[in-house]
Image (cartoon, helix red, strand yellow):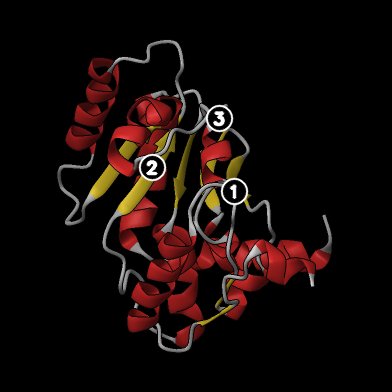
Amino acid sequence: MSTQVEQLETALLDAVLADPICRVLLERLPALRLEEWWLTAGAVFQNVWNAVEGRPAGYGIRDYDIFYFDDSDMSWQAEDIVIRRARELFADLPAMIEVRNEARVHVWYEAKFGVSIPPFVSATDAVDAFASTTCCVAVTRDRAGLRVYAPFGLEDVFAMHMRPNRRLAPQHVYEAKVSQYGERWPNLSYEPWRSQDEMSQ
């Protein structure tokens, strides 16, 4: 790992841990004994933006997303058990915490969004599918300590620059995210969505 990557990961963890909600989540999540779990989405990249802009940690974060992966039982009942355990574990936190089994997403995705998707193979596979590559970042804790997952790097996160990720989300979803985030973080910049024809020119 290069020195620059290490520095960015350290700065990211500092920004995430500055948020008391994130700090408690990362401390307690191992108690759920999930085989693979990650704190992800706005709880991570939006706290970096807050640090960059000098805003309070936790500013603008509407919910805290926890992805886990368990394909041993694909029933809603099994996922609901984990959700209820998490609700009890974090009952004292003044925040909306969303816990989801990414092994089940393909089961309900078509009914909600109108298109079918192949099953995710891991929680990090789901992180890879966010509408912007800039949002594909997550943090977990294992026996070695805190660990960062950032398949597209962290440069865009700290630059507050969004780029489209065409793997799953369509154009209107990406553009909606850009608009929503831009209202809360006006310094955010973005790469416009380009069609395949435009990209080939």
SS type, badge 3: loop
Task: Answer few, some or many: residues within 10 Å of disc 2's Cα (few below 14, many 20 plus, some between 14 and 19).
Answer: many
Residue 6: horizontal and vertical position, in percent?
73, 61
In the drawing, does residue 95 fall left or right of residue 40?
Answer: left
Q: Nearer the viewer, mark 3 or mark 1?
A: 1
Residue position marked by numbered label 1 in the rendering: 167
197, 61: nearer the viewer: 197
Q: Looking at the image, is mark 1 or mark 2 earlier in the sequence?
A: 2
Query: Do we see residue 125 in this rendering?
Result: yes
81, 112: nearer the viewer: 112
Quadrant where the image shows the C terminus = bottom right
Residue 135: horizontal and vertical position, in percent?
52, 60
Residue position marked by numbered label 3 in the rendering: 122
Marks 3/1: CA–CA distance: 16 Å
83 versus 1 height, above or below = above
13 versus 193 height, above or below = above
Task: Answer few, some or many: residues within 10 Å of disc 1's Cα (few below 14, many 20 plus, some between 14 and 19).
Answer: few
Toward which corner of the image does residue 28 lie, by quadrant?
A: top left
